[in-house]
Image (cartoon, rainbow, N blue to C red):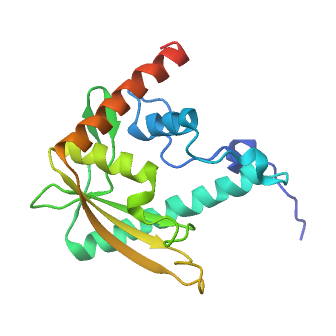
């Protein structure tokens, strides 16, 4: 048998990010959230990690989290009677909640993370809150449910922990969040020359 390693530049894992919607005419909420996150300095930069290849390692983590989140959404969505979501558009921004409750149209989002549930409960993760508030506003509801599988729980000891939370927001919280998203869209488009 002859074995040869293949190089596939098109599958560069270091460039993988979940929910990339390249080629669409309208920006996706996740793209705007990523742009805001970077500009506001909320997520730590990888440059200080101290070893080469950190970007690839982080991207593999994103890849795994994305795949596991989709599997969890499929599994739980069927058992709970949730309906797969369709892509939404509001103010020229695309949104893609994982599932919707058939009676209330409440968005349900499924997450898989390596974070510690003790240090990073769902209500404390800025990116998730921006996302959930955007979905709720676009659907005309005031709440969202997150089903978060923390791979290592609180790391004491490391064991999986499933956290399910309904977050109910005030109208002001939803409006302020959406104003930030719309302003972020405009600033992002200006920066990109669109």
125, 14: nearer the viewer: 125
Q: Horizontal placement of 19 versus 102: left or right?
A: right
Q: Horizontal placement of 51 versus 173: left or right?
A: right
Residue 101's spot in the image, x, y percent?
A: 18, 61
Q: Which residue lies furthest to the top in this view?
A: 193
64, 11: nearer the viewer: 64
102, 122: nearer the viewer: 122
Residue 191's spot in the image, x, y percent?
A: 54, 17
Q: Horizontal placement of 6 versus 143: left or right?
A: right
Q: Can residue 184 be seen in this view?
A: yes
Q: Is residue 8 visible?
A: no
x 59%, y 57%: residue: 63
Q: Horizontal placement of 5 versus 134: left or right?
A: right
x 26%, y 72%: residue: 78
Quarter that holds the N terminus: bottom right
Total labels: the figure holds 0
151, 68: nearer the viewer: 151
Q: In which quarter of the image is residue 134?
A: top left
- Above or below residue 165? Residue 22 is above
Residue 89's spot in the image, x, y percent?
A: 26, 34
Q: Residue furthest bottom?
A: 157
- Above or below residue 78? Residue 20 is above
Q: In which quarter of the image is residue 177?
A: top left
Residue 169's spot in the image, x, y percent?
A: 22, 52
- Above or below residue 88? Residue 59 is below
x 76%, y 53%: residue: 54
Q: Which residue lies furthest to the left in this view?
A: 103
x 63%, y 60%: residue: 61
């Amino acid at each position: 048998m002859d074995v040869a390693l293949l190089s596939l530049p098109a599958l560069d894992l270091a460039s993988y990010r979940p929910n990339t919607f390249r080629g669409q005419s309208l920006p996706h909420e996740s793209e705007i959230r990523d742009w805001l996150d970077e500009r506001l300095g909320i997520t730590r930069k990888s440059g200080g990690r101290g070893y080469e290849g950190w970007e690839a390692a982080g991207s593999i983590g994103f890849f795994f989290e994305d795949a596991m989140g989709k599997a969890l959404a499929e599994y739980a969505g069927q058992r709970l009677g949730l309906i797969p979501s369709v892509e939404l558009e509001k103010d020229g921004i695309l949104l893609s909640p994982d599932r919707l409750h058939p009676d209330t149209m409440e968005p349900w989002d499924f997450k898989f993370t390596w974070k510690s549930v003790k240090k990073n409960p769902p209500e404390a993760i800025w990116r998730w809150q921006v996302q959930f508030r955007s979905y709720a506003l676009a659907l005309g509801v005031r709440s969202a449910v997150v089903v978060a599988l923390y791979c290592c729980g609180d790391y004491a000891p490391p064991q999986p922990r499933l956290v399910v939370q309904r977050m109910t927001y005030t109208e002001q919280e939803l409006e302020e969040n959406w104003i930030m998203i719309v302003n972020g869209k405009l600033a992002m488009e200006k920066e990109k020359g669109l």
